[in-house]
């Protein structure tokens, strides 16, 4: 197990698609807790990548079109493998995840290989998360309390062994399944989630179909 008291390389992977209002601030706050941010531009059309191109300790990967969150995350993970980062944080670019919780995720990696945020959600969002979390708990043999949260921490060794192949949001469920299948321990950190007036980029029908495909792999 990694001795987290030693000097370790910590990276954050932040995929983004048209987040010009939030991107700079979420990256700035995240840099307080990590060595570098890998920001993956998933085909944005609002020019949001231009506001971070010259920031220190920020590496921008720009995709030629909008592929989906899962594809963008994996491109970021591929880069962390090349650079041999010890710990990798993932969080969303829309300010729903508070970077101040990053130290808690890192501390939890003393006892787990993958750590996932356990969100406090509005009532209308609880049911789908409970159902998918229950099904993934059955699938993996580990207690999954929140299957949908994108605020996560991975040990580098996990990402060197486990990859996702789905392009959409279902890739995050896929990572849970493959990590558990590889024998990695999954833990959780309770976090608040801030829901603003922004419109979700998730297509519910596509997300459900994608999850079902992943569940039966």
Image (cartoon, helix red, strand yellow):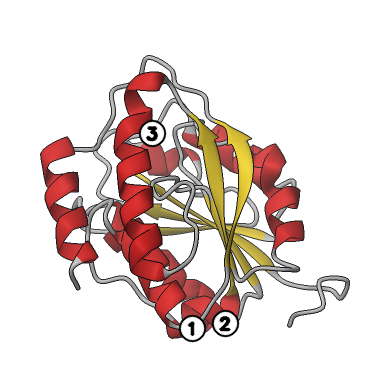
Q: From mark 1 to mark 3, how far is it between C-alphas? A: 29 Å
Q: Secondary structure at mark 1?
A: helix
Question: Cβ–Cβ below 8 Å for labels 1 and 2?
Answer: yes
Q: Secondary structure at mark 3?
A: loop
Within-10-Å neighbours for mark 1: few <14, some 14–19, many 20+: some
Q: Point out the residue furthest to the right here.
A: 5
Q: From mark 1 to mark 2, how far is it between C-alphas? A: 5 Å
Q: Residue at x 62, y 75 (%)?
A: 85
Quadrant placement of the C terminus:
bottom left
| Image x and y of residue 13, in percent | 50, 57
Within-10-Å neighbours for mark 2: few <14, some 14–19, many 20+: some
Q: Residue at x 52, y 78 (%)?
A: 158
Residue 49's place in the image compared with 22, above or below, is: below
Q: Nearer the viewer, residue 19 or 96?
A: 96
Tell me the mark number nearer the camera, choosing from 1 and 3.
1
Name the disc covering residue 211, or none. none
Residue 132's place in the image compared with 186, above or below, is: above
Q: Nearer the viewer, residue 45 or 159?
A: 159
Residue 177 located left or right of residue 81:
left
Q: From mark 2 to mark 3, how far is it between C-alphas? A: 30 Å
Q: Can you identify the residue that label 2 sits on?
A: 157
Residue 101's place in the image compared with 82, above or below, is: above
Q: Can you identify the residue that label 1 sits on?
A: 160
């Amino acid at each position: 197990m990694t001795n987290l008291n030693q000097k370790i390389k910590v990276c954050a992977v932040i995929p983004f698609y048209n987040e010009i209002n939030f991107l700079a601030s979420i990256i700035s706050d995240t840099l307080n807790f990590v060595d570098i941010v890998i920001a993956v531009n998933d085909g944005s059309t609002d020019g949001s990548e231009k506001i971070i191109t010259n920031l220190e300790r920020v590496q921008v990967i720009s995709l030629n079109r909008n592929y989906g969150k899962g594809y963008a995350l994996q491109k970021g993970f591929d880069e962390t493998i090349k650079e041999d980062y010890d710990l990798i944080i993932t969080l969303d670019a829309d300010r729903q995840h508070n970077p101040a919780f990053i130290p808690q995720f890192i501390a939890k990696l003393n006892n787990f290989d993958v750590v996932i945020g356990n969100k406090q959600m509005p009532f209308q969002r609880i049911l789908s998360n409970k159902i998918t979390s229950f099904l993934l708990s059955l699938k993996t043999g580990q207690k999954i309390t929140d299957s949908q949260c994108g605020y996560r921490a991975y040990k580098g060794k996990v990402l060197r062994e486990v990859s996702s192949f789905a392009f959409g949001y279902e890739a995050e469920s896929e990572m849970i399944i493959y990590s558990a299948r590889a024998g990695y321990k999954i833990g959780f950190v309770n976090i608040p989630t801030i829901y603003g007036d922004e419109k979700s980029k998730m297509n519910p029908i596509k997300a459900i179909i994608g999850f079902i495909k992943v569940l039966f792999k």
